[in-house]
């Protein structure tokens, strides 16, 4: 479970809850629009690797590799679609994934075993952002960052590029 007291001390739970309520509000509000006006930032190597692994798995249409980036109880939250919960459901939802995808970070924070990345996604390496995303991550005991929640939202006027087809 995402909010389980045995995994997180109270200050981490407060940060996580704040992130879950504040970040979606920022993404859906004008504070995050448009992402192409915000410069890309350098992420710590481990967080950057999550984005590159996500891109590579997406581009190759490898639903299993995409799902492996998530925690067992991870979520995918896409606009206009039901939430997808759990690795097996994520893998099933991503069976139709594939094509060009380029991710870039515009903000991040790490607090103990939790982190978030706010970024933009595009379909061409030098094109405009088609949308924005928030990844919430948790570090495993062996130091690997896994996605707890992946929320995306297309920019106004951007072509509709759903992350997965309705199942």
Image (cartoon, grey):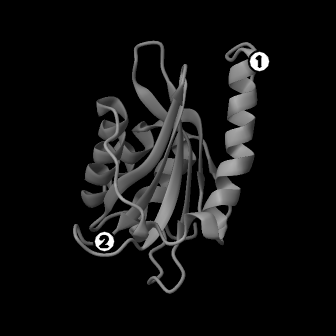
Q: Is residue 63 above or below residue 165?
A: above
Picture coordinates of residue 52, whole percent (x, y): 28, 46
Q: Looking at the image, which is closer to me, 70 or 52?
A: 52
In this rendering, the answer to whether 141 lies above or below 15 is: above
Is 63 left, or right, of 16 in this rendering? left
Image coordinates for residue 130, horizontal then vertical, percent: 42, 74
Q: Residues within 10 Å of mark 1 (few under 14, many from 20)?
A: few
Q: Is residue 1 visible?
A: no
Q: Position of residue 6 (x, y in %)?
A: 73, 13
Question: Which residue position holds label 2?
Answer: 123
**Is 24 in front, or is 144?**
24
Q: How far is mark 1 from mark 2, CA to CA? A: 40 Å
In-image side of 37 versus 152 (left or right): left
Is 139 drawn above or below residue 52 in the view shown? above
Q: Which residue is mark 1?
A: 10
Residue 111 sits in quarter: top right
Residue nearest the viewer, comparing 9 with 163: 9
Residue drawn where x is 49% and y is 63% of the image = 132
Residue at disc 1, secondary structure: helix
120 vs 78, nearest the viewer: 120
Residue 102 vertical position relative to residue 34 in the rendered view, above or below: above
Please tell me which residue is depicted at 68% across the width and 33% down the height of the picture: 16
Image quarter in which the N terminus is found: top right
């Amino acid at each position: 479970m995402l909010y389980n007291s045995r995994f997180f001390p109270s200050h981490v739970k407060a940060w996580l809850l704040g992130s879950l309520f504040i970040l979606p509000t920022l993404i859906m509000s004008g504070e995050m629009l448009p992402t192409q006006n915000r410069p890309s930032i350098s992420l710590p190597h481990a967080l950057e690797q999550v984005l590159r692994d996500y891109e590579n798995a997406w581009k190759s249409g490898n639903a299993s590799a995409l799902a492996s980036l998530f925690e067992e109880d991870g979520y995918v939250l896409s606009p206009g679609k039901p939430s997808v919960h759990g690795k097996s459901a994520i893998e099933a939802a991503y069976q139709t994934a594939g094509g060009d995808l380029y991710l870039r970070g515009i903000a991040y924070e790490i607090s103990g075993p939790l982190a978030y990345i706010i970024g933009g996604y595009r379909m061409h390496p030098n094109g405009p952002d088609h949308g924005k995303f928030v990844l919430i991550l948790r570090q495993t005991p062996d130091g690997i960052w896994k996605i707890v929640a992946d929320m995306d939202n297309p920019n106004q006027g951007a072509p509709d590029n759903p992350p997965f087809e309705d199942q």
